């Protein structure tokens, strides 16, 4: 067992559940009482993104706050289902625990695996067995339709690889990437916008797989690049202001000079 203070965790969760019961009960909040699991989906996505932002920026205080907000939304949705006699929070948590135990026989049983690939092969077999008799019979049936495209590309490549449908070597992926690049260039040279968009998508899809093989998650990598650009751009604006310059009046050469300065300080 871990050294976690389970009593404190249980008490804190119960406190949050009591808050939710008060919001939804007599004399509670009219807005909260109008909500449904479906109406809460966008709020869940928003809070999850705020949590991710705090984590990736290394801001522990924000991560702590946003993690609590995510828990609140999850418990709120669970309470709505329980009140509609759909299922209880206990049902959901126990289902998840049982599923994780089944999928980790090397931890909770005497099973041993000779490699990570064997572990993933067993994971996929277990999932297929769990889905017997359900609508999720095929490899990608469990892939959420609403995933952002870059994240979805990573998950598609990952699941395909777990099912042994991928290039044999990294060099093969690099060759394919070069081929996709040439096809994109050809489409642009022919001024075919529709074909160029398709070929650009193929290039990105293959690039995501090459990154995956190198231990890089494309969605996270691009987010870090976005944050770096925004951080440097803000520093560039601040530097211009410190020098009494109106940023919007600067030409590209002047902006590039400021950009090169802030890059050395980043």
Image (tube, grey):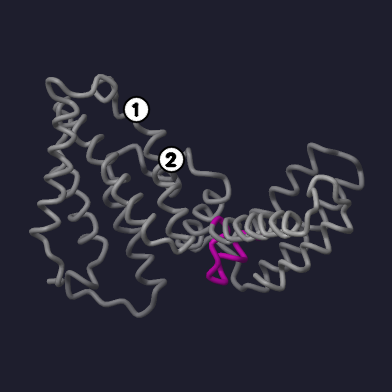
Q: Dot 2, crowdedness within 10 Å: few (<14), some or many (≥20)?
A: few
Q: Is residue 25 above or below residue 206?
A: above
Between the C-alphas of marks 1 and 2, the distance is 14 Å
Rendered residue at 71%/66% (across/down): 262
Label 1 sits on residue: 38
Residue 95 is situated, as x and y percent measured from the top left of the image, at 18, 48
Q: Earlier in the sequence, mark 1 or mark 2?
A: 1
Compare residues 43 and 121 and report the one nearer the observer.
43
Residue 184 is situated, as x and y percent measured from the top left of the image, at 81, 51
Label annotation for residue 177 = none
Q: Seen from this angle, which residue lies furthest bottom?
A: 114
Residue 106 is situated, as x and y percent measured from the top left of the image, at 24, 72
Q: In terms of secondary structure, what is the magenta stretch mainly?
A: helix
- Res. 14 image quadrant: top left
Label 2 sits on residue: 46
Q: Nearer the viewer, mark 1 or mark 2?
A: 2
- The stretch of residues the image draws in magenta is 207-219
Rendered residue at 53%/62% (across/down): 217
Q: Dot 1, crowdedness within 10 Å: few (<14), some or many (≥20)?
A: few
């Amino acid at each position: 067992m871990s050294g976690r203070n389970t009593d404190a965790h249980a008490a804190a969760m119960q406190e949050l559940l009591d808050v939710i019961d008060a919001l939804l009960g007599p004399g509670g909040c009219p807005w909260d009482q109008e909500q449904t699991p479906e109406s809460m989906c966008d709020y869940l996505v928003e809070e999850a993104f705020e949590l991710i932002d705090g984590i990736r920026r290394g801001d522990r205080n924000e991560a702590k706050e946003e993690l609590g907000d995510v828990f609140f939304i999850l418990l709120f949705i669970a309470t709505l289902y329980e009140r509609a006699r759909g299922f209880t929070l206990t049902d959901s948590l126990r289902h998840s625990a049982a599923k994780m135990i089944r999928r980790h026989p090397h931890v909770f049983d005497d099973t041993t695996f000779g490699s990570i690939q064997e572990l993933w092969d067993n994971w996929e077999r277990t999932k297929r067995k769990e889905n017997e008799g359900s609508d999720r019979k095929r490899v990608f049936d469990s892939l959420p339709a609403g995933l952002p495209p870059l994240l979805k590309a990573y998950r598609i490549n990952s699941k395909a690889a777990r099912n042994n449908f991928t290039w044999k070597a990294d060099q093969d992926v690099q060759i394919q990437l070069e081929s996709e690049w040439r096809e994109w260039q050809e489409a642009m040279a022919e001024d075919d916008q529709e074909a160029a968009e398709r070929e650009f998508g193929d290039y990105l899809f293959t690039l995501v797989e090459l990154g995956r093989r190198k231990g890089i998650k494309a969605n996270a990598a691009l987010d870090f690049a976005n944050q770096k650009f925004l951080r440097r751009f803000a520093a560039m604006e601040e530097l211009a202001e410190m020098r009494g310059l109106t940023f919007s009046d600067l030409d590209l050469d002047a902006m590039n000079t400021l950009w090169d300065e802030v890059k050395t300080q980043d």
